[in-house]
Image (spheres, grey):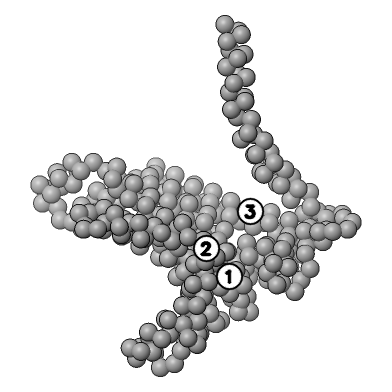
Amino acid sequence: MAMAKWMRLRENSLFLLPSIVLTLALGIYPLIWVLRYMFYDYPGYGSELFVGLDNFRRLARDTQFWESVRNTFVFAGGKLLLTIPLSLLLAVILNGKLRGRNFLRAIYFMPTVISTAVISVVFYIIFNSYNGMVNQLLLKYHLIGEPIDWLGPKHAMLTVILVAVWGAIGNYMLLFLAGLQSIPQDLYESASIDGANARQRFWHITVPMLGPVMQMIIMLAIIASLKGYESIMVMTEGGPIGKTEVMYLYLYKLLFPVSTGSPVDQQIGYGSAVGFATAVIVGAITALYYWFSRRMNKVF
């Protein structure tokens, strides 16, 4: 009996070994590396200089970082306010008896599997101020008198939010569809017999029954929105004049300045401190939402 237990333990350990090794190599070791270097002045080459809390003192005075925090909340808030309702609306429409609904589901989900860099380049061309498709259409139908600088200081944040919504809406639509298809149809039939119309069935059956799924979707959307930066890096590089620079893009420029064309030198030590602060901010927002959602569950 003891031998059988030992054999089972050894087999289970062998199955878990690849996951443990990958977690240690790609998760735990980089975390330890970051926690160490945020107390050093290290440019990525040469010697390391221990500076204690100087990186965090610099972070507290770094107006560019705090501006990126503000931009992150604007970007994430705008994306969430548009993505969640539109995803739910599309899911409800495509869950009905609509001709070609499977084709439409595939079309709306397609942006999720396309490279973010490719999507961003395409939309950069579409929103081009001089010969972009958006301005050409608006001018053709006399909706504007002159081309709009969609990637300028005034409209750049709105533009990157719209692109982010277009890229994310299909993913959350699919999750909402899974939730809708798990709702028993008997509830809708009973409500129809009692005289409930489509609007009443939606608010009193669909929305409450989607509660657990919606909580998960909103949490995933919050994390993805706060961490998103790829499309912004391709379309605006955080500009103009820092209007679209978000936390993770600012961090990326500190760690990989050559790839982004940033004029500053590589700053591994300060970048580690910024990365730690960024992770704390994202974790705090996520924990706050989790606490709030659990409180709402107890209330309702």
Q: How many marks?
A: 3
- In the rendered structure, are the residues bearing label 1 and label 2 in contact, judged by CB atoms less than 8 Å apart? yes
Q: Is residue 138 above or below residue 298?
A: below
Q: Nearer the viewer, mark 3 or mark 1?
A: 1
Q: Nearer the viewer, residue 257 or 39?
A: 257
Earlier in the chain: of badge 3 and badge 2, it is: 2
Mark 2 = which residue? Answer: 116
Q: Which of marks 3 and 2 is in front?
A: 2
Q: Is residue 203 above or below residue 73?
A: above
Amino acid at the residue labelled 3: Ala
Residue 234 disc label: 1
For image coordinates 15% across by 45% down, the residue present is 189
The image shows residue 281 at horizontal and vertical percentages of 61, 56
For image coordinates 30% across by 59% down, the residue present is 104
The image shows residue 74 at horizontal and vertical percentages of 52, 68
Give the quarter of the image for residue 96: bottom left
For image coordinates 84% across by 59% down, the residue present is 45
Q: Is residue 97 above or below residue 29?
A: below
